[in-house]
Amino acid sequence: MSQSGPGLTHGGSSVGDGQTWAAAERETTTGDMSALTREESARLVTESTSDLSVFGPDIVAKAALLIARYPQSRSALLPMLHLVQSVQGYVSTAGIEFCARQLNLSTAEVSAVVTFYTMYKRKPCGEHLVSVCTNTLCAVLGGDAIYAKLREHLGAPDRPLGHEETAGTPGEPGSVTLEHAECLAACDLGPVLQVNYEFYDNQTPESAVAVVDALRRGERPAPTRGAPLSDWRTVELELAGFYPEDEAEYRSRVDGPSAAVETLRGAQLAADRRWTAPPMPDDAPLPAVEPKK
């Protein structure tokens, strides 16, 4: 049975020479019990403001355009986070504060969104983001082997590159950030990887190494389908909704075949064999909806 009394806790451990805080000569504060000095404690609770100068007038203007697209300003948070990543290559503490100020949100509200979605990065990314699908089908077809090979190839001899780690200096030409990704919605072409969200289908460990080596040399190998390859920050600006105003340049950025033969095979078979789904009658009875109580 545990004991309590002068100098003893309920667990039986001794406290100093038997004097409890209640018996001390003066009233104590949490500051007295802290391992930090009063000066150090004061620094921890003093509000600090991040340096937002990296978000210049052009970015502030783009943020205003995003806000104007929505009935409620907070709805612009997701594209605004992409805008922040196009500037810094990730969502920093300053980026969170920038979004909070623009949208009249708390930094806690912005942080909750940033940490929920994996597309928002919490440390700087490379010039290129390489995402390897390691979900079930791609994994058994070779996705796990591809990811393991790229980890070894991009890492140090005694330490493979980890998830969301970068080979090279983040943001500089030729730098590559590697991540394993959940389903990339290309099971008919697995195993697949993406570079800055563009597809490279039917990959092998050897072909994946060839892709990242080309990226590190400053080349931009053509994706299997989709738009021509851009760097990651440019893609983030596009995901925020900003494209070149020149029509020809815009088309050169976004045009490209997006569907593969394998993807359309089922639709083609249905068309060739005249398979159709029965249309829904105009007078079809709708299911009853119970009134709210």
Image: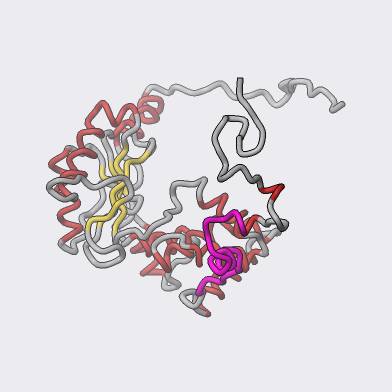
- Name which quarter of the figure residue 34 lies in: bottom right
Please report the residue visible at 48 percent of the width from the left and 64 percent of the height from the top: 84
Q: Position of residue 279 (x, y in %)?
A: 59, 24
> 116 or 83: which is nearer to us?
116
Q: Is residue 50 magenta?
A: yes
Looking at the image, can residue 79 be seen? yes
Looking at the image, is 232 positioned above or below residue 205? below
Q: Position of residue 165 (x, y in %)?
A: 30, 51
Q: Is residue 203 magenta?
A: no
- Asked if residue 226 lies left or right of residue 46, the reply is left
- Asked if residue 7 lies left or right of residue 197, the reply is right
Most extreme residue toward the front, as rendered?
A: 17
Task: Give the extent of the magenta segment.
Answer: 32-51
Please report the residue visible at 65 percent of the width from the left and 66 percent of the height from the top: 68
Looking at the rendered image, the quarter that the C terminus falls into is top right
Looking at the rendered image, the quarter that the N terminus falls into is top right
Please report the residue visible at 63 percent of the width from the left and 62 percent of the height from the top: 69
